[in-house]
Structure formats: C-alpha cells, structure tokens
Image (cartoon, rainbow, N blue to C red):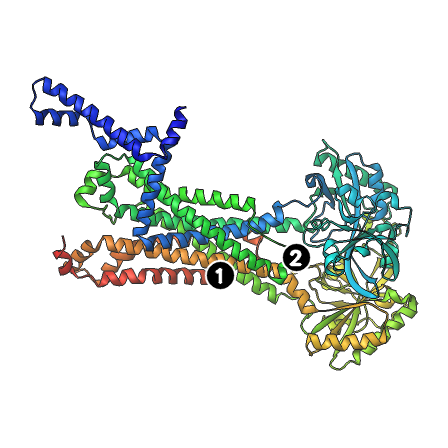
C-alpha cells in the first residue's frame, strides 16, 4: 500500500509539496514556541528554530525523494533541468548529437549487416544441429565434399547423425512450359532433403526418399516461391503440370515456402530435383563414380551427440573407405561446420564482419572520448553554477547525477538519430543491385534495436562519467571565489588523456582506410594471367547435340570458325570452365610409372582446364615457352598438356618442364608448353598449379567461348546471338562480359574499401573537433594569462607554444601511438583488406600528412585568436 501511495503521489505533486511545506512550518513553529517559553525574544527564538531545523530546501528535497516512488519524480526534475541546459547551449547540443550519431549510426549499420549474415539462422527446423561435412584441409569457396557412393556409405555406417543429405548445387537447366523457356539454376538433392530440413511446401508437396527407386526414377521438380511468383505469376496450375527440363519431362510436384531458399544464404536455388535424375538434366551420371566428387553433404546430429563425437565417427568411416577403395578414396580427415556461408568461405566472411564491427566500435569510442572532453570543459565552465547549488544544499551526488542525466539525455537523442540514420542507409544499401544479387537484406530488427539501445546507454556512461567525477571532486568555495576552474599549463588532466586516446584511435582508423585503398589498388593491379577487358563469355551446353568424340570436336571447330567470322572479333577459343566463376577443384596427378593410383600416391592436385586452340590468344594468357595446343592433338595422338609456372616448379623444380611427363586420369601426358601463373578461384588465392588439356583429348559437354572484340558488350551480345543462333539453333546459351565477372570478385574488396574509408573520414572529423575543442577551450580560459605574456614581451612563437602547444603535442603523441597500434592490428586488417600492410611507406606518409594537416587546420583559429590578444583591453576587464 505504501508503494502504491508513493506512485500515486507522482500525479498530485502540488498537493504533496503543500503537505511537506505545512509539516516543515509546524516543526519550526513548535521550536519557536519552546524557545519563547524559555524566555527568548521573538527574533532570537525564530532564528534559533531555523538554525536547529536546518536548510528547509534540503529537508524538502529529502522528503520528496523519500516519498517519490524509486526517485522517479527527482529523475523527472533532472530531465527537465537537463533540457533547459541543452536549450541554452544549442551549438554544444548540436555538436554532441552529430558527433555521437555518427559513431552509433555506423555501429548500427555494421551490426545490422552482421546480424543479417551471421546471427540469423537458416529458416529450417533446429538449424543448430545441422552440420556440413568438410575436408580437414581448408578449401576457399568450394562446397564439394564427397562422391555419391561415398555419401551412401556414410549414411549407412554412421551412428551419430539422424540423417545425411547430398546436394549437387548450382546445376543449370532450361525449363520449358507452354512453349516458353526459362533459364534456371537449382540444386539436385537426395530424396530425404526436405524431410531432414523439416520444411513445409507452400503449394503441392515435396518429393521424398520413397520416390527414389534408382537412376532416372523420380522425374519430379519443386519450384522456389520466387520463381513461381516471378516467372510464372503464381499460376496455381503449374503444380501437377509436366514441364521440360533440358528436354526431359518432369512433374512440378510443389512450390517451396517463401522463406525457404535452400541451405546457402547467398545462393538461392530456383528449383530442387532428385539427384537420381541427374543424368537427364546434366547429361552424365555420377551416381556410380567414386572419383566424381560433386556432392555437398549436410547432416543433422542425433540428440545428445556432440560435434566432436560425430567428427570422430566420420573420420573412422573415412579411414575404412580408404582401405576398401584405395584407388579412389583418399581417407582425408573430415570436420564439421554449420552450413549457409559457402563452405569454408564462411570463416572469411565471419572474420571480415567481426573485424569491421571492431573498427566501428573504435569510431564510437573515439566519439565518446571527444564528447567526454566537451562535457568536461562545459562542466568546468559551469563551476560557479554548480558551487552555488552546493551552497544551497545540493549534494555532490545530486550534481553528479544531474550531469549524468544530461549525458544520458544527449545519448538517447543520439540513439534515436543514429537508428534513423541507419534505417535510411540500410534501405539505400538494400536497393543496390549487388544486395539483390547476393540476397542480403539488412534491417533494423529487435536485435539491432537492442544493440543500439545498449550502445546508447554505454556511450552515456563513457562520456558522462568524467564531468560527474569533476563535480564530485570540485571545491565549491574555490569556485565561488575564483569562478570557473582555471586551466593550469603544467597540470596533466584527464582531458589530455582522453584527447590523446582519441587521436590514437583516429590515427588507427585513418591508417586502416589508407591500407584499404592500397589493398584495393594492389588487387586492381594484381596479375590475373588473363585479360577480362573486351572479352565476352558465351556458355553453351553442347551435350544437347548428343554428339561425342570426333563429331563433337568437329562441331566445336565449326562454331569457332563461325564466331571468328563475326565482325569485330579478333580472337576466339573455348574452355570448359573459366577462372573467377567457381566450380574449381583439384585433380590427382601421378608420377610416370605409377601403377597404384590411390589418392595417397598422388603428387599434385592442380586445376584442370580443357581448352581449344586460340584460347590463350582470346584470354590473353602468355605462353612462356614451348607450343600451344592444336587441333592435331587428338585422341589418337600422344596426350599433351600445357602447365603453368607453379605446376612446373612444384613438379620439377628448376628442371625445364618441356618434355616432362605426368599421369592424369590414367593417361601418360607430356608437357609441351608453359604458361604464366594467374588467378583461378579468387583474387586472393596463392599461386596454384594448373594444367591445360587439349579439348580433342579431354571431351567435355560444357563449352564456354572466350570472344575478344573491341566492340561494346551489348553490340557483341546481339552479334553473337545471331551468329551462334544460326549455327546451333537448338543449343541453349548464356552471355556475360568477363569484366562483369571480375567486378563481382572485386565487390567484397570495394565494400571493405568504402567501409574503412567512411570510418577513416569519421575519425578524421572527430580528430578535428577534438583538437579544435581543446585548443579553443585552452585559449579562451587563458586569455588573461596570454595578455600578460604579450604585455611582458613574449614573442609570437612563444605565444603560439603557450596557446596551442599542448594540443599539438598530444597530436604528435597520439599519432605515434596510433601508428604503433596500426602495426599491431595488421592481422585484424588482413581479415578485411587484400594484402594489408600498415607499414607501407605510402600508407605511413599519407597518414602522417593527413593527421598533421588535421592538427594544423583544427588549431589555426584558436592560434589566430591567441595572436590577436589585446592586453590593454583584458586588463580593464573584471
């Protein structure tokens, strides 16, 4: 009842104030009556009663504080007073809000992206128990784990998983319905895929394990909701209808729910079909091949089974398979990771996002240090006001609480502004084409809002504690006598520490931005081993022709001649897969004379490319020695290959590679040429061995034409469609500029450069405001001292040193500390930037020049004010 009464008193404050005033008067009057009875005069009795009772304002505040529920009324009064103080200093309030809004807004944006990528689980049942099998050796961006027969062995023999599914991802197919073709990309999966993931269809049904009864036994397809609505206008009649996938009939049995996109966050499937029907779509059957490692394996742990137990179980099975199938299974150790982030690339993505988040927190820390200095200076200027409040009965704790309330109020305003800024920026980012292509949608959800609130409250404490500490330690008597606290030149104040720390953090962030720019420059100038500019990629599935052997080679030759005759074409060649487009995995290479082709006997695992004559000229890959492949290299002639420099060095060291032999796919192959190294999987990979095999000796249904021409991409697309459409009317094709492929690879680096450059720019602004604030404050507080120095004959240099020497000294010290921190933070930057090197002379020179320029620019106005001081005018004041 007492608590209820106190809360109700908050809504009838005037009545409560009257009651307390009446109570105080009754106590004073009782004391006066007692004093009069003792013989005192009326004035003496009243004076004695007031002295004995104490400061009635303090008594009233204590009574109100005890009466108000949990001090809410007192907090309300503090908030009102803080608002009045901020209204009196609009410039200060605006500076504080903008400064902190940048820091909090940047953190909310970065965390929103991190939240969307890392913290949101896959939309499946119990995603925490899902694990993807990986080889122990880290493999960038490659999802492949197993052959289909090996998957079947793992499914039968393991004791730790409730189920394992196999996924052959990124298959391409032309779906024809009502005579309209649709180029789609989807996943071929085992029949238990949907059941293990625990998802439900939006329309129709899913296929199941019971539908599989051997190769080509389950001609069913499930469409994604996006394709159903986008390509087929959500036509319900397509469910149950028969469509053609690569000219084979399939029944559309269902449509997936809108929130389900598969097991990869950045690669959404257009369709899913049973892997047992792979041959109809792909043109080949890998279900019976233990050497075709094309399956990604994902499993769900049984309840109570740990990740380590499951890993040990799988490795025991892998060792058994190596003994049973020594020619094909290599017995590599396995490990488990959570699916969703393109295999092991998830490690890179996680490190990148957490590292950027750490740098964003440094921006916020610098902003808090800046505001702490501003609030401390403002509290010092209010020294006389605070002293008067103490003299009137306020306690130091009450003053500290008041200053913290002001800091909290500013921080809450900033938090709202930061959330608004982040929401607008995220909407703009989500509208970018790159965001749509990667299916990344970062939004301010409940988790992001909670983090924003925490950052807001922590920020208030960080920059509000210093002025509160000053109020607690202040001397009211000295403040009343001398006004605001004086600045002492030799005193090493907490404000100095904060400014030095702020400059060090800002230097670190500016260094990171320069490192990012230099990393981007290195990436743009990195030797690729090919030239994507002015080159078009034309994907063609010649398996549709149902040609093999010499007939297929003849058709390829005729298509190359047709393309070469196209106006504007300067070079043309074919390759089975192109660099920078994924799908890379190593093939086993053996020494000549090897008869036991088990995995442990292989000596190298290079990427293999099947190329036609003319590919090197079309790709502009340099032939360093030997000869190119030719059309005379056929299945009836000795097998030959071109190798790159890394292949030659790893196989034969300094011995010339031309004329050397190795075994690949069971064929003794002679090296006839050596080409330059390049980039094949991504721009950051280390030099990797590669072998190029003649297309006539290494048949492959997938053919990609590399067409070089100075004409624009749009002109070449139209011309090539006309040429190839006439030469191969029934072959599906897709076209893309090779430069666009490279731009896709550069997207993460560009994002890192933009992010770090933005943080560096914010840090530079914070450094300017911090140095300017301290220099201006120091000059304004010491104008009389400076006037005395001028009157005594101090020179301009001495005056400048006295006025802004300390801020500039702190600038130099902060720069030194910041550069040292940048060198120590090289591993952190390396997770974000390509070949990060903070000790690069250009980086160091750029950072030094930037920070010195910031210091000079920020100190210029206060220094001019100090040089223009008028001693005679100052002496007449006060």
Mark 1 closeness class: few <14, some 14–19, many ≥20 residues within 10 Å: many
What number is the disc on residue 843? 1
- Image position of 35 (left or right of 252): left
What number is the disc on residue 438? 2
Along the line of sight, the residue nearer the viewer: 624 or 34: 34
- Residue 504 sits above or below residue 743 on the image: above
Q: Quadrant of the N terminus?
A: top left
Residue drawn at the location 36% of the way across and 41% of the way down: 404
Residue drawn at the location 58% of the way across and 64% of the way down: 522
Sequence-wise first label, 1 or 2: 2
Along the line of sight, the residue nearer the viewer: 302 or 175: 175
Q: Could you say where residue 840 lies in the image, as x and y percent from the top left?
A: 51, 60
Q: Nearer the viewer, mark 1 or mark 2?
A: 2
Q: Is residue 808 visible?
A: no
Q: Could you say where residue 343 lies in the image, as x and y percent from the top left?
A: 70, 49
Residue furthest out toward the bottom = 567
């Amino acid at each position: 009842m007492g608590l209820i009464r106190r809360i109700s008193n908050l809504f009838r404050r005037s009545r409560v104030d009257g009651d307390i005033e009446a109570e105080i008067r009754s106590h004073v009057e009782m004391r006066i009556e007692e004093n009069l009875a003792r013989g005192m005069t009326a004035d003496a009795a009243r004076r004695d009663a007031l002295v004995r009772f104490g400061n009635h304002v303090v008594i009233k505040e204590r009574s109100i504080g005890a009466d108000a529920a949990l001090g809410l009324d007192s907090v309300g009064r503090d908030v009102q007073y803080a608002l009045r103080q901020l209204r009196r200093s609009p410039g200060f309030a605006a500076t504080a809000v903008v400064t902190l809004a940048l820091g909090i807004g940047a953190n909310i944006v970065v965390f929103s992206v991190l939240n969307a990528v890392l913290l949101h689980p896959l939309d499946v049942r119990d995603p925490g128990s899902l694990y993807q099998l990986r080889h122990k050796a880290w493999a960038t961006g490659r999802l492949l784990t197993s052959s289909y027969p090996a998957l079947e062995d793992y499914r039968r023999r393991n004791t730790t998983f409730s189920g394992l599914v196999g996924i052959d991802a990124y298959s391409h197919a032309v779906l024809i319905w009502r005579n309209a073709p649709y180029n789609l990309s989807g996943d071929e999966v085992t029949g238990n895929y949907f059941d293990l993931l625990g998802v439900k269809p939006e329309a129709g049904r899913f296929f199941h394990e019971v539908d599989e009864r051997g190769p080509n036994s389950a001609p069913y397809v499930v469409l994604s909701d996006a394709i159903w609505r986008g390509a087929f206008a959500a036509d319900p009649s397509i469910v149950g209808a028969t469509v053609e996938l690569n000219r084979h009939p399939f029944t559309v049995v269902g449509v997936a729910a809108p929130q389900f996109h598969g097991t990869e966050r950045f690669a959404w499937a257009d369709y899913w079909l049973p892997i047992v029907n792979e041959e109809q779509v792909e043109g080949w059957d890998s279900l019976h091949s233990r050497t075709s490692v094309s399956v990604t394996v994902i499993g769900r742990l049984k309840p109570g089974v740990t990740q380590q137990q499951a890993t040990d179980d799988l490795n025991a099975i892998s060792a058994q398979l190596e003994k049973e199938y020594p020619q094909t299974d290599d017995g590599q150790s396995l490990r488990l990771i959570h699916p969703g982030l393109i295999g092991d690339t998830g490690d890179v993505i996680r490190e990148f996002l957490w590292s950027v988040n750490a740098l964003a927190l440094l921006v916020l820390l610098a902003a808090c240090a800046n505001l702490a200095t501003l609030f401390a200076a403002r509290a010092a200027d209010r020294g006389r006001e605070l002293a008067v409040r103490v003299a009137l009965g306020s306690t130091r704790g009450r003053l500290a609480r008041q200053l913290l309330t002001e800091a909290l109020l500013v921080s809450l305003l900033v938090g709202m502004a930061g959330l608004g800024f982040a929401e607008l920026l995220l909407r703009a980012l989500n509208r970018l084409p790159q965001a749509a292509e990667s299916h990344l949608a970062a939004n301010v959800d409940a988790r992001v809002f909670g983090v924003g609130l925490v950052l807001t409250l922590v920020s208030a404490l960080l920059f509000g504690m210093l002025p509160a500490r000053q109020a607690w330690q202040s001397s009211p008597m000295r403040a009343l006598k001398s006004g605001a606290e004086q600045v002492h030149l030799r005193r090493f104040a907490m404000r100095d520490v904060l400014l030095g720390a702020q400059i060090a953090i800002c230097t670190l962030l500016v260094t990171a931005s320069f490192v990012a720019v230099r990393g981007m420059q290195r990436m743009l100038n990195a030797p690729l081993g090919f030239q994507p500019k002015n080159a078009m990629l034309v994907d063609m599935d010649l398996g549709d022709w149902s040609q093999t052997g010499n007939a297929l080679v003849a058709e390829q030759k005729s298509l190359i001649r047709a393309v070469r005759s196209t106006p504007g074409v300067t070079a043309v060649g074919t390759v089975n897969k192109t660099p920078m487009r994924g799908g890379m995995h190593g093939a086993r290479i053996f020494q000549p004379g090897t008869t036991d082709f088990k995995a442990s006997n292989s000596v190298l695992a290079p990427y293999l490319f099947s190329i036609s004559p003319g590919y090197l000229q079309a790709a502009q890959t340099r032939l360093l020695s030997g000869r190119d492949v030719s059309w005379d290299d056929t299945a009836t002639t000795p097998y030959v290959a071109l190798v790159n420099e890394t292949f030659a060095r790893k196989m034969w060291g300094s011995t010339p590679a031309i004329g050397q032999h190795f075994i690949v796919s069971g064929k003794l192959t002679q090296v006839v040429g050596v080409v330059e190294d390049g980039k094949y999987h991504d721009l950051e990979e280390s030099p990797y061995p590669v072998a190029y095999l003649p297309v006539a000796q290494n048949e492959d249904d997938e053919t990609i034409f590399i067409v070089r021409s100075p004409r624009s991409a749009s002109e070449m697309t139209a011309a090539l469609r006309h040429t190839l459409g006439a030469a191969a009317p029934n072959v599906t094709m897709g076209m893309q500029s090779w430069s666009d492929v490279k731009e896709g690879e550069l997207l993460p680096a560009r994002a890192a450069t933009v992010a770090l450059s933005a943080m560096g720019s914010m840090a530079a602004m914070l450094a300017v405001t911090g140095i300017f604030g301290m220099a201006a404050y120091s000059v304004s507080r010491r104008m009389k001292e400076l006037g005395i120095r001028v009157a005594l004959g101090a020179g301009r240099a001495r005056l400048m040193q006295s006025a802004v020497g300390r801020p500039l000294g702190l600038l130099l010290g902060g720069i030194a500390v910041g550069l040292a921190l940048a060198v120590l933070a090289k591993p952190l930057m390396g997770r974000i930037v390509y070949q990060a090197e903070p000790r690069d002379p250009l980086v160091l020179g750029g950072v030094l020049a930037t920070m010195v320029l910031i210091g000079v620019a920020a100190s210029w106005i206060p220094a001019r004010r100090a040089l223009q001081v008028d001693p005679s005018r100052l002496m007449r004041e006060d």
